[in-house]
Amino acid sequence: MTKTDNLLKKIQTLILQNKFKQALTTCDSILKIDKKNFQANFNKANLLAEIGFHKKSLSYYNKALKIIPNEPLTLFNLGTTLYDLDKYDDAIEIFDKLIKIQPKNSDAICNKANTLVALGKHKQAISTYDKALKINPNDIIILNNKGIVFAGKSRHKQAIKCFDASLKINPVDMDTLCNKGNSLAELDNFSEAAVCFESALEIEPSDIDACFRLGVAYSNTNRPREAILCFNKVLKKDRSNTDALINKGLAYITLEKFKHAISCFEKALGIDKQNTDAMYHKSQCLVEIGKHTQAISLLRKIAKKENTHDHHDHEHHDHEHHDHSHLSLKDKILKDTHFAKVKKEKIYSSFIQNLH
């Protein structure tokens, strides 16, 4: 074996040991001797991309392709690196070149579809995923990616078909179970969504997102105590998770434990003072315990924010009152059962009349 062969072998060993910087140094040792060594250029490009230097890696991919034009793996890695750099049109050009050479390369076709998604070309992406699935019908990554595109377009029934096809192949795939659960929740089928998240947590008990979403599903199937246990697990790992705090508060409202609920909403407001969801749900509890002045004070704050359009977006997933989230404050209060007994009282009626 030559010195170069030994160094190339050393690079592979270092890569397997995740010693990327040492592997890069070894690549440079080869390139000092032989600038046109394909493997050294190719490995250096991959290593630079691996440690986050995507832009730097491009020139080495291009050098490798000058040495061996249209080498499939180099084209594939160049395409994925261009994708990581948000150079989507360039990435598609490379994937198309590779697909011409290897028409049955389902990974390249799938990555082209992913890139079309990033460009917002969803119809093209779905037909491209279908091409990949004709070649490899049992690829759960392709099935999931196609399902996620349908879910993103609120076509959840079609998304679920993709996730079900994936679960037939691998019934214990964590990502598929969570994806299916999310789509079922979007269709308000929270009992089946809960089953998906329960199965996901059997596979990966420490998954916080699945635990949070299971809590939401429990809340929406009138299992508030179990929901609170889920939100507590989330908060144990992330005390500042306002989504978990608000949803925990909502579960306490279901149990009519209004002081416990207020404590949750106050913690959320301690993290995010402008959180109108926490303000509104706290005001519901204040009404229930007869603290009307404080409730009105909070509602005034919300109204002020609504009037000045000073909206801060908070992604609180599937609150108990998620169907009211698009309503104006006035309509919200008028439809809200917590305000039913008091909305005709002077303090509330004059406030409601002044709302737009």
Image: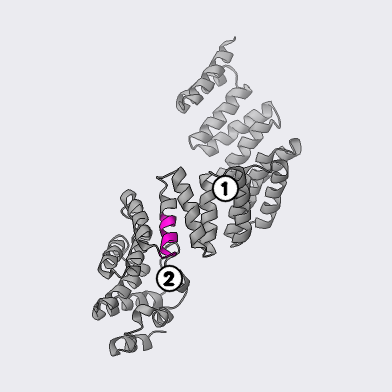
> Could you tell me if the residues under marks 2 and 1 are in contact, i.e. CB atoms within 8 Å?
no
Horizontal and vertical percent for residue 280? 35, 72
Q: Amino acid at mark 2?
A: His
**9 horizontally vs 225: left or right:** right
In primary-sequence order, the first of circles 2 and 1 is 1
Q: Nearer the viewer, residue 264 or 229?
A: 229
Q: Nearer the viewer, residue 132 or 354?
A: 132
**185 horizontally vs 255: left or right:** right
Q: Secondary structure at mark 1?
A: loop
- Disc 2 target residue: 321
Q: Residue visible at 41% across and 63% down? A: 219
Is 110 included in the stretch rendered in magenta? Answer: no
Q: Nearer the viewer, residue 51 or 300?
A: 300
Q: Residue visible at 57% across and 16% down? A: 33
Is 219 included in the stretch rendered in magenta? Answer: yes
Q: Which residues are magenta?
A: 212-222
